[in-house]
């Protein structure tokens, strides 16, 4: 059986029993005129394609990889706006946390403190660091405040010299214990760990920042301490390292997809042509991306694999049809023309729908996801252009298939038998097929109720990776590694000198600290209370906000005289109009972050009511992750509706039937529901990656149903039997669908080898969704067609038969007239 169109009796049989269809005489359509033009100008087409590819290829050296921080954040979410404003005013967008953990004893000895001091000094002088933001017990900007006998305030660095004796070490220990800004924040509660926190300028790239940090800590790594690194820049740098692995995974994907295509054709020539088409599409798409100055990131880096698989899949469709037509005509150029005429319209339809589905991501509220969607859409459009020009031109230039190649290509193998069984089963029990599908959907809906939303970037990595190990260690020993920032903005200068405002800030800090997972809380209010206590001889009862704003101003002036103008610049601006509360969290999980931030918003609205300030909650990683969670849930629903509407409208227009649009949507809806249900049952959370799978899976899966329905409609012209048309379509188009879906699934399953959790989930779920789409197309769609008997299929078949009859009658009349003239 030639699986792309030459039919034989059901159950198999050798080539001698193949029943060849006679290609009907049809009027020349615009597609046929186009195809014959491409074949005539085949050499010109190949040369032009090569020239365009060269132009795009010259742009590839300019393509670079960059994980842009703000490009991964929702554009208009209030939490993100607060984070961006805090970063612009105080820094805090690139916060690095370094933990120095003593393996024996505590940190209060010259050896460990020396390491902390040297690391702090190197970090303080590192490129792009915001020096006043560097915090550790040995940092110059970390001051202790002491009251003298004359009620004067003495401000000096906590560690001016490393302790040389046990007595000096004990004095330092007591100084840390008596100041809550140090104890539990810069030194762990068990005193075995010290932390160094630093903000870097937002313009430095994460990979460069991580290298600078590693250079600062590397000389201090030995068997006496454990040095752990955490913070969003460290995670993003690791993300960039994994992203660079695509340079290895992509060639492997080419080889794997090539092997799938070889299994489809069993000829080297037929294997290489789809791959060449696909690789040209990738070059065009990446060239355009480089041309417009768009860098590669975590999402766009995986798009070449998808473009490769989809483009190669379309090329397989047209090449499969070529083999069928060549077996009929034994003329390679005529076979090329006929294959374009048959497959071209459906390829254009399916390709435009896929491109439109990916392009719909432009409405996503995250810059990197919009770029991802546009890259995929441009790749699909490039593939369409190449497949409608270069592929047929190149195929007509290549030598015709040999007899042995034809025999290998149409050999009856396991897949043919499986498809024949599947077709017979669906024809015999279409209602049972739909009943089983309904049971599966019900189970999936129950699973969907168990799906949780979480966008924690640390969960993008496996638990056994170094970044996760370091992160867990610092969460255990220190206040946490996830940041929380709250912006306080006054209506005028010196608003933050008002006692009522500072007391409200202090109360908000207390409310934050009631949750044991929040620590490292500090702000201008804490410094004012320290200064007031020192001014009163260290009396614990005076650790409070003074009632006089003038006294507060004087304290801060005295502090700045000793600590310098940048001494409090990480907490308050020079006009005392804007301040930030800084805190750390041991977790950034979605449920915790959402509940905490909503509670703080309600509390701040009540506590700051009537005060001349506004409170912005919340910046830091907690606010960002919560914003991502909000966006994923909202945008997921919107994007599903968008893509579904695009597919439905375009299919309804192409087939001139609303029922056709619904038929195409059926396997896509099944794939989405089953995939989400599977996520719920196995405990995979919904995040940016799994949300993107929906658009990808729907856009890819639509091709399968479109190709199958086109084929059923074509077969009806010849057979006038819906069952026979469906059976033949499953045996022919179904085989192509099986190979295309296998190629896409294989390409994405390769991501499992990356060891990168987010890519592993993406690869497994995309492969699952594509496979479900293919199976649902071959079973559920065909069962629906058998039960519904949609009129649009018969209407199209009747119209085509009438056209054939008209042309045949006109041809017969012309022949009779010619015979009469000759007589």
Image (cartoon, rainbow, N blue to C red):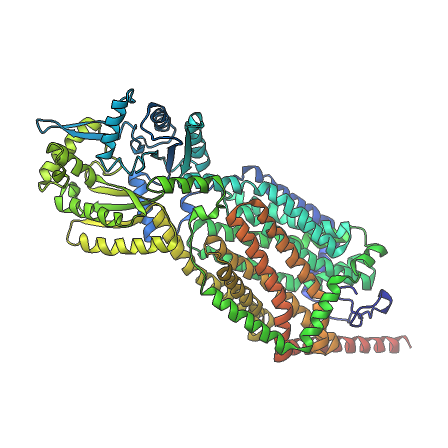
Residue extending farthest to the right is 823
Q: Is residue 61 visible?
A: yes
Question: Between 436 and 6, which is closer to the camera in this rendering?
Answer: 436
Question: Between 652 and 479, which is closer to the camera in this rendering?
Answer: 479
The x and y percentages for residue 365 are: 41, 54
Vertical arrangement, residue 236 with respect to residue 698, above or below: above
Q: Is residue 161 left or right of residue 773?
A: left
Question: Between 554 and 26, which is closer to the camera in this rendering?
Answer: 554
Question: Between 442 and 134, which is closer to the camera in this rendering?
Answer: 442
Q: Is residue 617 left or right of residue 439?
A: left
Residue extending farthest to the top is 164
Q: Is residue 566 visible?
A: no
The x and y percentages for residue 327 are: 81, 62
The x and y percentages for residue 180 are: 23, 38
Q: Residue at x 79, y 63 (%)?
A: 412
Q: Is residue 823 left or right of residue 160?
A: right
Q: Residue at x 37, y 56 (%)?
A: 591
Vertical arrangement, residue 88 with respect to residue 22, above or below: above
Marks counted in the figure total 0
The x and y percentages for residue 600 are: 26, 53
Report the quarter where the N terminus lies. bottom right
Q: Residue at x 37, y 42 (%)?
A: 476
Report the quarter where the C terminus lies. bottom right
């Amino acid at each position: 059986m030639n699986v792309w169109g030459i039919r034989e009796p059901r159950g198999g049989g050798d080539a001698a029993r193949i029943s060849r269809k006679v290609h009907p005489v049809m009027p020349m359509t615009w597609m046929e005129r186009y195809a014959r033009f491409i074949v005539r100008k085949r050499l010109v087409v190949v040369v032009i394609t090569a020239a365009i590819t060269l132009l795009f290829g010259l742009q590839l050296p300019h393509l670079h990889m960059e994980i842009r921080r703000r490009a991964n954040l929702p554009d208009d979410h209030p939490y993100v706006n607060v984070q961006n404003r805090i970063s612009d005013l105080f820094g805090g967008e690139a916060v690095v946390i370094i933990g120095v953990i003593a393996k024996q004893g505590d940190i209060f000895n010259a050896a460990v403190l020396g390491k902390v001091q040297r690391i702090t000094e190197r970090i303080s002088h590192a490129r792009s660091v915001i020096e006043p933001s560097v915090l550790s017990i040995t940092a110059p900007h970390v001051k202790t405040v002491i009251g003298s006998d004359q009620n004067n305030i003495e401000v000096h660095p906590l560690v001016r010299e490393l302790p040389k004796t046990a007595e000096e070490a004990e004095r330092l220990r007591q100084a840390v214990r008596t100041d809550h800004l140090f104890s539990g924040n810069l030194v762990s509660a068990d005193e075995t760990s010290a932390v160094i926190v630093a903000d870097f300028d937002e313009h430095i790239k994460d990979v460069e920042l991580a290298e600078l940090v590693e250079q600062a800590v590397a000389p201090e790594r030995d068997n006496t301490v454990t040095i752990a690194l955490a913070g969003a820049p460290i995670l993003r740098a690791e993300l960039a390292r994994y992203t660079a692995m695509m340079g290895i995974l992509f060639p492997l994907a080419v080889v794997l997809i090539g092997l799938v295509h070889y299994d489809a054709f069993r000829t080297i020539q037929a294997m290489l042509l789809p791959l060449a088409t696909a690789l040209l599409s990738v070059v065009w798409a990446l060239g355009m991306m480089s041309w417009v100055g768009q860098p590669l990131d975590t999402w766009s880096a995986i798009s070449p694999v998808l473009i490769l698989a989809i483009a190669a899949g379309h090329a397989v469709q047209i090449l499969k049809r070529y083999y069928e037509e060549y077996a009929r005509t034994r003329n390679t150029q005529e076979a090329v023309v006929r294959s374009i005429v048959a497959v071209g319209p459906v390829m254009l339809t399916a390709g435009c729908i896929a491109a439109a589905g990916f392009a719909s991501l432009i409405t996503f509220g995250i810059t990197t996801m919009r770029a991802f969607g546009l890259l995929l859409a441009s790749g699909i459009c490039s593939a369409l252009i190449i497949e409608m020009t270069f592929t047929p031109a190149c195929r007509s230039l290549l030598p015709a298939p040999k007899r042995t190649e034809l025999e290998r290509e149409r050999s009856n193998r396991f897949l043919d038998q499986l498809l024949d069984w599947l077709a017979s089963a669906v024809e015999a029990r279409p209602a049972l097929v739909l009943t089983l599908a309904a049971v599966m959907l019900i189970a999936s809906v129950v699973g969907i109720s168990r799906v949780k939303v979480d966008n924690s970037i640390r969960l993008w990595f496996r638990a056994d990776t170094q970044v996760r190990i370091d992160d867990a260690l610092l969460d255990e020993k220190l206040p946490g590694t996830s940041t929380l920032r709250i912006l306080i903005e006054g209506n005028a200068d010196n608003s933050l000198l008002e006692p009522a405002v500072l007391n409200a800030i202090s109360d908000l800090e207390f409310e934050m600290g009631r949750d044991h997972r929040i620590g490292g809380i500090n702000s201008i209010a804490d410094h004012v209370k320290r200064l007031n206590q020192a001014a009163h001889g260290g009396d614990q009862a005076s650790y409070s906000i003074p009632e006089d704003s003038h006294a507060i101003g004087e304290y801060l002036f005295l502090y700045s005289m000793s600590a310098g103008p940048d001494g409090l610049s990480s907490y308050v601006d020079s006009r005392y109009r804007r301040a930030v509360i800084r805190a750390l969290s041991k977790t950034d999980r979605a449920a915790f972050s959402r509940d905490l931030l909503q509670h703080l918003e309600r509390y701040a609205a009540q506590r700051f009511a009537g005060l001349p300030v506004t409170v912005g909650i919340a910046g830091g990683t907690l606010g960002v992750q919560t914003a991502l969670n909000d966006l994923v849930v909202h945008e997921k629903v919107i994007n599903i509706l968008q893509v579904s509407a695009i597919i439905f409208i375009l299919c309804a227009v192409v087939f001139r039937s609303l029922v056709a649009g619904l038929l195409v949507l059926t396997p896509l809806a099944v794939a989405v529901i089953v995939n989400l249900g599977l996520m719920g049952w196995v405990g995979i959370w919904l995040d940016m990656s799994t949300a993107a799978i929906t658009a990808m899976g729907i856009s890819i899966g639509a091709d399968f149903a479109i190709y199958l329905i086109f084929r059923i409609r074509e077969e009806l012209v010849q057979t006038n039997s819906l069952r026979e048309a469906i059976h033949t379509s499953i045996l022919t188009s179904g085989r192509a669908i099986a190979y295309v879906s296998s190629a896409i699934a294989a390409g994405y399953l390769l991501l499992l080898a990356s060891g990168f959790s987010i890519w592993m989930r993406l690869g497994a779920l995309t492969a699952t969704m594509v496979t479900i789409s293919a199976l649902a197309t071959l079973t559920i769609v065909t069962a629906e067609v058998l039960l519904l008997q949609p009129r649009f299929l018969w209407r199209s078949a009747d119209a085509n038969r009438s056209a054939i009859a008209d042309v045949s009658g006109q041809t017969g009349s012309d022949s009779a007239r010619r015979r009469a003239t000759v007589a």
